[in-house]
Amino acid sequence: QVQLAESGGGVVQAGGSLKIACAASGYIDFIYFMAWFRQAPGKEREEVAGIWPGRGNTLYSDSVKGRFTISLENAKKTLFLQMNSLEPEDTAMYYCAARGSQTGFTWQNPGSYRYWGQGTRVTVSS
């Protein structure tokens, strides 16, 4: 089993920056891919960014590309999301997710992930 716990959310003004983190524990060597998702009130959960821990390759949704950076430190133990140039539309609950299977998957699909954190709230004020 893998446990994920997000932290670092808060309130920030538009144009500002925030860095959130996700601490992974348990069978972290089992993790093949990790990602950040977000869910705004009344909306579906959507992908934000993803990373292959073994290779360091990253993926981003078009809405955050160039503004957000996903990174992994401490041998998969901590996943980060650096968010710059924040906009009110970025307001949401942010979740980290992980999967262990190496079989083909669609990273944007929440159903591709077995492990989820409890979320951390990010509010961007205008």
Image: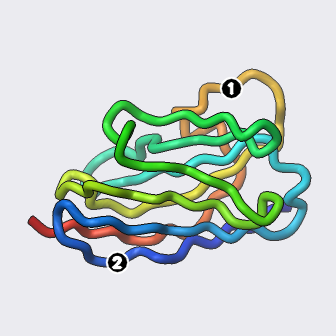
Instruction: For marks 1 and 2, give the CA distance.
Output: 32 Å
Q: Residues within 10 Å of mark 1 (few under 14, many from 20)?
A: few
Where on the picture, by quarter, is residue 90?
Answer: bottom left
Relative side of 57 to 103, left or right: left
* Labelled disc at residue 92: none
Residue at point 9%, 65% (across, down): 126
**Secondary-structure class at tag 1:** loop
Residue 75 image point, x, y percent = 83, 60
Relative side of 70 to 32, left or right: left
Residue at point 85%, 61% (across, down): 1
Q: How is the image coloured?
A: rainbow
* Labelled disc at residue 105: 1
Above or below — where is 44 with respect to 103? Answer: below
Badge nearest the viewer, 1 or 2: 2
Q: Residues within 10 Å of mark 2 (few under 14, many from 20)?
A: some
Where on the picture, by quarter, is residue 16?
Answer: bottom left
The amino acid marked with disc number 1 is Phe
Mark 2 = which residue?
10
**Secondary-structure class at tag 2:** strand
Residue at the top extreme? 104
Residue 62 image point, x, y percent = 36, 31
Residue at point 89%, 50% (across, down): 30
Mark 1 in CB contact with mark 2 (< 8 angstroms): no
Above or below — where is 104 with respect to 70? Answer: above
Residue 115 image point, x, y percent = 70, 55
Residue 63 image point, x, y percent = 31, 37
Residue at point 46%, 59% (across, down): 82
Residue at the left extreme? 126
Above or below — where is 26 with respect to 36? Answer: below
The amino acid marked with disc number 2 is Gly
- Which is more N-terminal, label 2 or label 1? 2
Foreground of the two, 55 or 62 = 55
